[in-house]
Amino acid sequence: MFELFQYADEEYFKMINESVPKYSIEITLETHDEKIRRDNGKFSCTNQKVIDSLNFALKHNCAKIDLFFMVGIPGQTYTSAVENIDFCETIHLACNKDPRIFYFVAPLAPFLDPASPAFEHPEVHGLKKYCHTLEDHRKAITQPSWKHMLSYETKDMTRNDIVNSTYEAAERLNDLKLEYNLINKEDYYDIREKIEKSKEYIKRIDHVLSLPADEQAFELAKIQEEIEELNKYSICGKNELKWEVQKNYPNFFSLALVGIEQLYEDYVNKIRHFLSPKRRQQFQLDTEYQKIK
């Protein structure tokens, strides 16, 4: 598997094809917006050049192309994030509807990479950073919703915008795949259901977090089993990600589950601590007594 970060001409793919028995390509294009790509230094070429690269790869026997678009990158607006799916259709048609191209959309989540330029100088990149220290990140990962885990916002998109545009783009991409027979109906309806449920859980978790602290643990426990079942799936087809690329694109439901488990455990410990004051006091007295002896 070869990963591309810039335009590649036909000779490049010809050499690959002659050098290996079989190959695939992974491209994190991030966005259809040429200006944003130039600013980020990734595929700083025209969209036509992107399409040319894809067609060259397909012409020279590339077995599979994974093409990723991101939500929440600097300079991107809600509308621009959703319009990535329009560019997916443009690419699909320009590449003769070749089924070897697989399209994905995912948020830049949950954290900015520590020590990266965006992390060190967020204001330069149009970002607002919420997590500064290791402890900030530890606390963030305990949040029960990936929206609340996000360590940043951009000057153009709030956390809500990033979450909502991610799901809207995912819905549109799912529709696109069905329209062009890139996904079967069973997977289509399965993904659509997962997206709808995940949107519902975002709202429910927001409500839970607005409750008094002593009520939150009970409410989180009520939905934990539901999310655990949902966690088995993602918003892309179960057979689409053949390569080991999932590690870079976190499963939203998995993030929610991790946060709920840790947050729930914190509340259980707090409640247990609150309900057992005598036992706690006795332990402290025993300890002091041991020191005196």
Image (cartoon, rainbow, N blue to C red):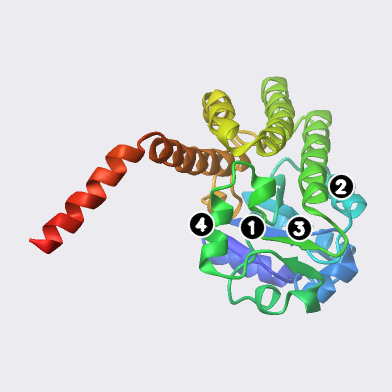
Q: Please report whichever mark, 2 or 3, sits nearer to the chain's N-terminal start.
A: 3
Residue assigned mark 2: 82
Q: Please report whichever mark, 2 or 4, sits nearer to the chain's N-terminal start.
A: 4
Q: What residue type is labelled 2?
A: Val
Residue 46 shows up from this direction: no
Residue assigned mark 4: 21
Q: Label 1's element? A: strand
How far apart are the alpha carbons under marks 2 and 1?
A: 21 Å
Q: Please report whichever mark, 2 or 1, sits nearer to the chain's N-terminal start.
A: 1
**Looking at the image, is 47 positioned above or below residue 187?**
below
Q: Please report whichever mark, 1 or 3, sits nearer to the chain's N-terminal start.
A: 1
How far apart are the alpha carbons under marks 4 and 3?
A: 19 Å
How far apart are the alpha carbons under marks 1 and 3?
A: 11 Å
Q: Are marks 4 and 1 in contact (CB under 8 Å)?
A: no
Q: Please report whichever mark, 4 or 1, sits nearer to the chain's N-terminal start.
A: 4
**Looking at the image, is 182 positioned above or below residue 243?**
above
Left or right, 137 with respect to 42, comes to left
- Image coordinates of residue 18 in percent, x first then y, are 57, 65
Q: Please report whichever mark, 4 or 3, sits nearer to the chain's N-terminal start.
A: 4
Residue assigned mark 3: 54
How far apart are the alpha carbons under marks 4 and 1?
A: 17 Å
Report the front residue among 176 and 17. 176
Q: Label 4's element? A: loop
Q: Which amino acid does label 3 sit on?
A: Leu
- Image coordinates of residue 10 in percent, x first then y, are 74, 68
